[in-house]
Image (tube, rainbow, N blue to C red):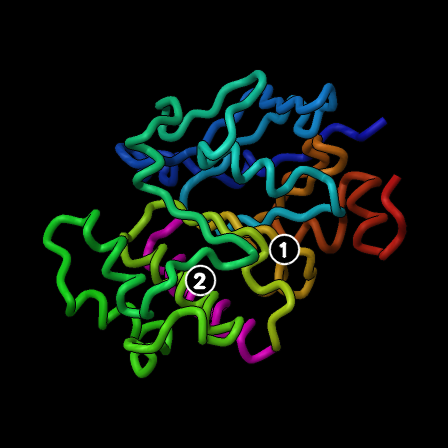
Amino acid sequence: MLERAATIDETITSEEVASSAGTLLPLEVNDLTLVIGGKRLVDTIELTLAARSFTMVMGPNGAGKSLLLRLLHGLLQPTAGSIHWGGKELSKEIRQRQAMVFQRPVLLRRSVAANIDFVLRLKDGATADRRDEILEHVGLIDHAKQPARLLSGGEQQRLALARALVLEPEVLFLDEPTASLDPASVLMIEQIVRAAHLGGTKIIFITHDPGQAKRLGDDIVFLHRGRLSEHSPASRFFTNPSSAAASAYLEGRIVL
């Protein structure tokens, strides 16, 4: 039996809660469940995420990490339970204030600049200057006229990030955005994401890399068999995990 999940409620101050008034945060998840083909892939998750923190989501393969992000972003409908952003139920309006980047970039078969222009049409007052600004920020301004499909894997992921960030989302979901990339590309993406967080964007980031989670994370959400096994500050998670599943995972043992 899994141990009761630890929380970081004690680290959330009243000032942080007050600062999130009128925004999408805090996120409150109650009894969130997803059943597909008779299998509980996400199982009665209870979770609260406050503003400001950089949240890393970890767990073994098949733990439900990607499914959780898709549920939180509204790409999947839960079988049971509720999701509230800033006290409001998940809706189309809320989704428009969020963005998601996947492990494999989803890009248009157009130029790099055209990929940004496509999403900028959704933003009032958007200009070509804003497009060039974001491409400069992610190091792709010199590739603006190049077909997106000719970019390297790391460059494509940076373009996917640029397309997400140009709309200035309040929440950014990242599903293993640096998987299979070389160290230099990983570093560049981490710098871009960290800058977004410092600019006020809430980050919820899936990773299998403990080193990456230590570098970036304020708090860790650890899933096991579709359940929330632990939610704790990163410093505590890596030095004194409260669940047996997390301990086994960090030690490189098979998580039973």
Could you tell which of marks 1 and 2 lies nearer the N-terminus?
2
Circle on res. 207:
1
Disc 2, SS: helix
**Point 62% across, 63% down: residue:** 179
**Point 41% across, 34% down: residue:** 26
**Point 32% across, 69% down: residue:** 111
Dividing the picture into quadrants, the one containing residue 91 is top left
Residue 39 picture location, percent across and down: 74, 23
238 in relation to 63, above or below: below
For this orientation, the residue located farthest to the left is 125
Range shown magenta: 183-202
Q: Which residue is disc 2 drawn over?
A: 193
For this orientation, the residue located farthest to the front is 109
Residue 108 picture location, percent across and down: 37, 59
Tell whether 245 sits left or right of 97.
right
Disc 1, SS: loop
Residues 229 and 147: in front is: 147
For the C terminus, the quadrant is: top right
Residues 241 and 196: in front is: 196
Q: Amino acid at mark 2?
A: Val
